[in-house]
Image (cartoon, grey):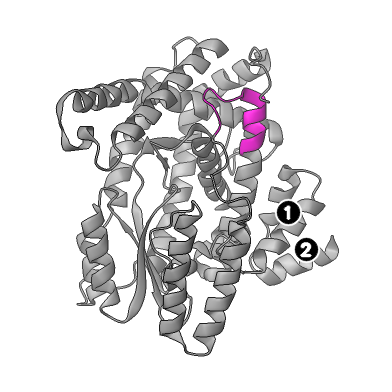
Amino acid sequence: MPRPFDKLSERSIGVRKADRAGSLLAAYLAFLGLIAVAAAAGGVLLFRDLSSGDPIDAVANRNAYDIVGWELRHLPEKWLYKLATVFDGDRSRAEEDVLIGRYFELTADIRSLERDGSDARRGDGSEAERLAEARREQRAIENDVEETLEGRISDLLRDEGIVMNPPFFSDIDLFFPPLDFELDRPPKVLAVSPRERIELDRSYLLVPGLEPEAVADVESVAEETGVSALVVNTGGVATYPSVIPELASYRSVVETIIHEWLHQYLVFYPLGRSYFSGQEARTLNETVANLAGRELADLFIQRYGSPTPLPSPSQTSADFDFRSEMRSLRLRVEELLTERRVEEAERLMNEKRDEFETRGVYIRRINQAYFAFYGSYADTPGSIDPIGPKLQRLRDRSGSITEFVLLARSLRSEADLDSLLAEA
């Protein structure tokens, strides 16, 4: 059970006020550092000429997500809000809880009203009015909810000892990099893999509002070139501010905020700086952020409780082990592709997708691109990468989640991880 809501400590309130006084300096430094990293990473990711005539590049370019435009809109807006409220009085713990609770009640209402086929989505009658009113109320309190969650999560991360001081400003007690996120609709991703093997050949950020017909068209155009393609929703993006799904559950929002902040934090260490050096480094980064984000979110819920009921486990057959089934599928697909039985592998993936749905697990498509994309998260059912179990062993041998992060941030490769495990 969540612990009862306690009164905020005087220390936490005092630290928050000190943070407000120095937050602009910290944000400026963080933003410069992140811009430098983003520029280097962008050079690697976007070296491809999107006007080259390649049909995959062309369809991705037509539906591309404008990261620069998003940053230019949201970063100034975020810090102008902080400036406007810097001298406002602090809310009580109970007032914060009511505010957060109301936001996620509205989130649940909006999700329900926006389901496919609802009257609200077609714009009919009272349902449409309810949806519009829920959106208006949610937008009206969004900045306050973001500010409250930023303060609470910052307190947790500071108390856990994961944050650092700004470079060259070690005598200033600031939270760095400053935690900053925006509740918004995150982009989709087009993942592309060769059909004859599972490998993330390329990926593109796409606009979040693509309708199912447009998604199918993007995948069809890509697959006409002989590859496996899949458009998936992202769980969040570590821009600055981070993009966090606005219609996710409370537990998911907290975990994603921490996950994306960890990416920003790790940029200042070997693990984060190596992110774009290859698939191995990307898998290390994503899996560390997954493991640490999940455990830190658990600690957050223990400290602050949940203003809404936590989601219950998905309803699946008692004799159905999804993780085991998905792992078995991935191994069998690898065997078939190694034997060049591509069509047989694809038939098997389609059959298993249908079987999973009858067991209560809905996955729109399972193909080579699905496994290539989700394989970067080596602690998930769709991955057979040994990095996942190895990082879990490192976590099990660490005395705390903080020690795990401090150890993992020095990694650049699986060989580094092997050496660290040998030393441990």
Hey, what amino acid is under mark 2? Answer: Leu
Secondary structure under tag 2 reads helix
Q: Nearer the viewer, residue 278 or 139?
A: 139
Return the residue found at the far left.
124
Residue 228 in the image: x percent, y percent? 37, 74
Circles 2 and 1: CB distance less than 8 Å? yes
Q: Nearer the viewer, residue 137 or 343?
A: 343
- In the image, is residue 309 part of the stretch drawn in magenta? yes
Would you say 386 lies left or right of 331 here?
A: right
**The residue stretch that appears in magenta:** 297-310
Q: Residue at x 20, y 28 (%)?
A: 128
Hey, what amino acid is under mark 1? Answer: Leu
Q: Residue at x 34, y 50 (%)?
A: 187
Residue 53 lies, with reference to residue 84, above or below; the image says: below
Residue 411, by quadrant, is: bottom right
- In the image, is residue 38 part of the stretch drawn in magenta? no
Would you say 166 lies left or right of 25 here?
A: right
- Mark 2 or mark 1: name the one nearer the start of the chain: 1
Residue 200 in the image: x percent, y percent? 45, 71
Residue 231 in the image: x percent, y percent? 34, 61
Secondary structure under tag 1 reads helix
